[in-house]
Image (spheres, rainbow, N blue to C red):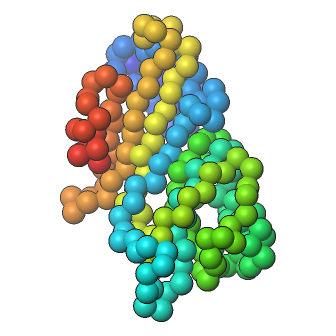
Amino acid sequence: MREAHPIEQAVGMDYYVSDAEGTGGRLRASPEDFRVTELEAFDVQPVDADTGGYQHLVLRATLRGWDTNDFAGRLSDGLGISRERVSWAGTKDKRAVTTQLFSVDGVEPADLPEIADADVEVVGTAPDLGSAGNRLTVVQAHANAAGRGQVSAGLAWDESEGGPGLFYEAAGETDPETVAERV
């Protein structure tokens, strides 16, 4: 193992796992270089279905440059409701393009406001969002030892009976079906 850079040692990373020199470049040069997609694990009903007492509209929002709490506040302001009526499974990174679920209590799809830098889709109704984790995509721009100037990798966090796990898939090393199956 190779000794880590002094800055990394200052935060507790003493060695690199690999002796390789690395590829150079920058991570997250723009929000599009870091994508977070929430994995969904819940049963959704159509908007017009009998909800059996719950009135939560489930939305899938793709956000660019939004903090989750700020988006929830903007959504509730646009709907003229309390911020407490907007829920989500987990916060996401503001300096990214994120796709995540929100549930809003007691609103109709027609009431949804237009929000800049947000693409909002009505999914249906559900009593619980039940997030299964996140799939992360990180782009390394301007790599100097990786061939065509970019290296892309997908990361996903999965909670299973065996405990939590982090999966790393480098572009071109694993086919998309295998990644989806593992995650």
- The residue nearer to you, when weighing 151 against 19, is 151
In this rendering, position of residue 137 left or right of residue 167: right
- Number of callouts in the render? 0
Q: Quadrant of residue 96?
A: top right
Q: Quadrant of residue 64?
A: top right
Please say if 148 is above or below 73.
above
Residue reaching furthest to the bottom = 53
Please say if 174 is above or below 3.
below
Quadrant where the N terminus sits is top left
Please say if 84 is above or below 11.
below
Image point 54% across, 64% down: which residue?
Answer: 122
Q: Position of residue 42 (x, y in %)?
A: 37, 69
Image point 31% across, 22% down: which residue?
Answer: 172
Image point 48% across, 64% down: which residue?
Answer: 123
Q: Position of residue 29 (x, y in %)?
A: 63, 26
- Judge whether residue 73 can be spotted in this image: no
- Judge whether residue 178 can be spotted in this image: yes
- The residue nearer to you, when weighing 97 against 3, is 97
Image point 61% across, 83% down: which residue?
Answer: 106
Please say if 155 is above or below 78.
above
Q: Position of residue 139 (x, y in %)?
A: 50, 27
